[in-house]
Amino acid sequence: MAIRAAYRHCQTTAAPARLTAAEIWSVARAIRGQLAIGGLERKLELESVVPRILALEINEVAFEVDWDFEHEVLNAAGKPVMGVTEYDKASPDCVLVSVNGPTLSGMETLLRSTIAHELGHVVFDAPGWIRVPPTAPAYSGVPPPDQSQDRREVRANEFMGALLVPPMLVRVDLQRQAKRQHLPASDCPSTVIPGALAYDGSRLDHDAVEEAIFELAERYGVSTRFLQVRLDRYDLLRTGRDWSLH
């Protein structure tokens, strides 16, 4: 069964519109809902669900995905990278995702985030490649010449973050952690998630905040740094400092 999702896009080229972060998070939520075993599942075991991400239908563009975890992945300069998503019109209805399995062996959290990031490229970049095949092979990680910052990478990162640490789930879990740790909420709620409590980490007990971040990271299967970035991004935990977490 194909994984399905939709978002604002050009009807002619299938290229994504300028999507807001909230729109990207919504797509991640839709994809996650088709991958998670249970609706309340936190750690998304992407390694085990990859076999279910072999066929996608995005904005009514259907295509297949071929995953490769067996080989080292190199960039154009010959240096190892975590992963790459590519398309060649010689295989018009398929994209190839290569994840650097040899390098990421034993690095569970990094492997999970790499798979999620490349899936973001599949969801947002592949439909355009399929609809209007580029003349030369296309690769993720190669910015267009007219962009100082590659919007595709920013978009894939936002997708990755929301797929692995969904804002509405981590909002609830952070509140529970705060209650257990007796951490008072800020007078100013989150400016990103309407109605969500926020916490001013710099005004709270360092050890308690560090413990909350660690426990949440363990539950979601990400690094503590990854979890902290998502809490900051959702304006749920305003640390304003480096908690020396990795």
Image (cartoon, rainbow, N blue to C red):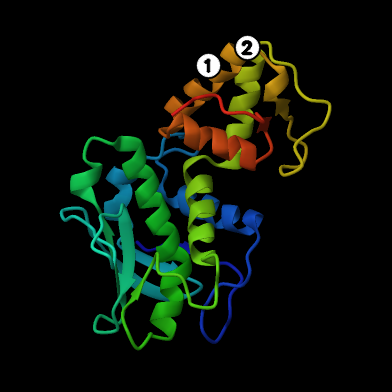
Query: Badge 2 is on which residue?
Result: 181
Q: In the shown orientation, is residue 50 left or right of residue 228?
A: left
Q: Is residue 169 visible?
A: no
Query: Badge 1 is on which residue?
Result: 211
C-alpha separation, residue under disc 1 versus residue under disc 2: 9 Å
Say what amino acid the circle numbered 2 marks.
Gln
How crowded is the residue under tag 1: few (<14 C-alpha within 10 Å), some, or many (20+)? Answer: few
Nearer the observer, 65 or 209: 209
Mark nearer the viewer, 1 or 2: 1
On screen, 12 above or below 47?
below
Name the quadrant containing residue 222. top left
Residue 27 position in % (x across, y down)? 55, 57
Q: Is residue 51 visible?
A: yes
Say what amino acid the circle numbered 1 marks.
Glu
Residue 31 position in % (x across, y down)? 47, 54
Element at label 1 = helix
On screen, 95 above or below 180?
below
Element at label 2 = loop
Instruction: Look at the numbered discs 1 and 2 and tell me whether their residues touch, using CB distance below 8 Å.
Output: yes
Dividing the image into 4 quarters, which one contains the N terminus? bottom left
On screen, 151 above or below 28?
below
How crowded is the residue under tag 2: few (<14 C-alpha within 10 Å), some, or many (20+)? Answer: some
Residue 205 position in % (x across, y down)? 65, 12
Name the residue at 45% across, 32% down.
Answer: 220
Give the residue at the far front of this rendering.
77
Give the residue at the far right of this rendering.
187
How many numbered marks, from 0 up? 2
